[in-house]
Image: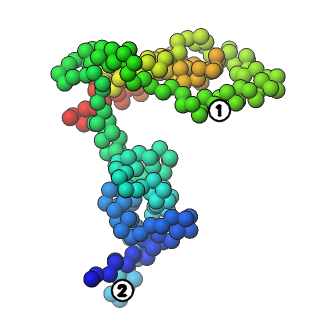
Amino acid sequence: MTSAKVPSRADQQLIDHAREHGFTVTGKQLSGWRRYGLLPANAHGGGLGRGQGSTSQPVAASFALVLGLARLSGRGKRPTDVALFLFGEGLPVPEPTVRAAFQAAVDTVRLPGTEPGQDVDENLDAVDSYIGRGGQAAVMVPARARRLDEQIVAFFESAGVPWPPKELARWDEHLGDERMTPQGAALFAADALLTGSAPLPRIGALLRGTTPGLDVNPIVSLVETTVRDVPHSPVLGPDDSPAMLTGDVRRVNGH
């Protein structure tokens, strides 16, 4: 019978840090997280001299990551999903791991109604037909966010202050413009996925659709007027879409 491997001093610091915050973490877990690229290796700290080996220290990012990993990891959770959860919370997960996780997520996207060999227009028609038959549509504003918006409006109205303030109207150059519907948002997402095209005016319509209770939205107006205010921007393509999007984004690596 073999005994469990004793964690290094550096790993013990991470284990103790997790315990101080109410989590139980083992050396085996740390090794597994490193194997999947979720946790950086410890930094070499130099030799102890006279054959006593060398020292190491956890990198600063590891202390925040080990708490996130202890909370988000678990049986049945894919490492790529955990990487995206960590990134979504603003935790310093290694960049190569995040990029690989995003690529894996995009590679698995399957649009309903589409068939291999169809061109882009045929695929978009198929998605549009699917949505029209009562299929999936984007959730523009989650119910919790809608409740918060309603509470904000009610608070200001109870104080006799209209929300949003009418004075903001002069800062919204596209007042009353299109607000994208949930069905339109689903088709817009499919279009952007298949063609890499997401023109700023359409992004503006999408943003207006996510704030249905606001008649005035100066921030969205800034997005919609970017092309005029920042002409010849290097980050925009010929159709005023973000230049980093080109073609079917699922094939960004050529597959």
Q: In which quarter of the image is the N terminus?
A: bottom left
**Which residue occupies 51% across, 25% down?**
140
In the depicted view, which residue is nearer to us: 100 or 19?
A: 19
CA neighbours of label 2 inside 10 A, class few (<14), some (14 to 19), many (20+): few
Q: Residue 131, percent across and down? A: 37, 18
Pointer 2 residue: 52
Say if 229 sits above or below 81 in the image: above
Toward the viewer: 142 or 90?
142
Relative to residue 3, is residue 74 drawn left or right? right
Question: Which label number is shown at residue 148?
Answer: 1
Task: Compute the Cα span from label 1 to label 2.
Answer: 60 Å
- Residue 212 visible? The answer is yes
Residue 103, quarter of the rendered image: top left
Residue 10: horizontal and vertical position, in percent? Answer: 43, 72
Q: Which residue lies furthest to the left in this view?
A: 117
Residue visible at 32% across and 36% down?
106
What's the amino acid at mark 2? Gln
Instruction: Identify residue type, mark 1.
Output: Leu
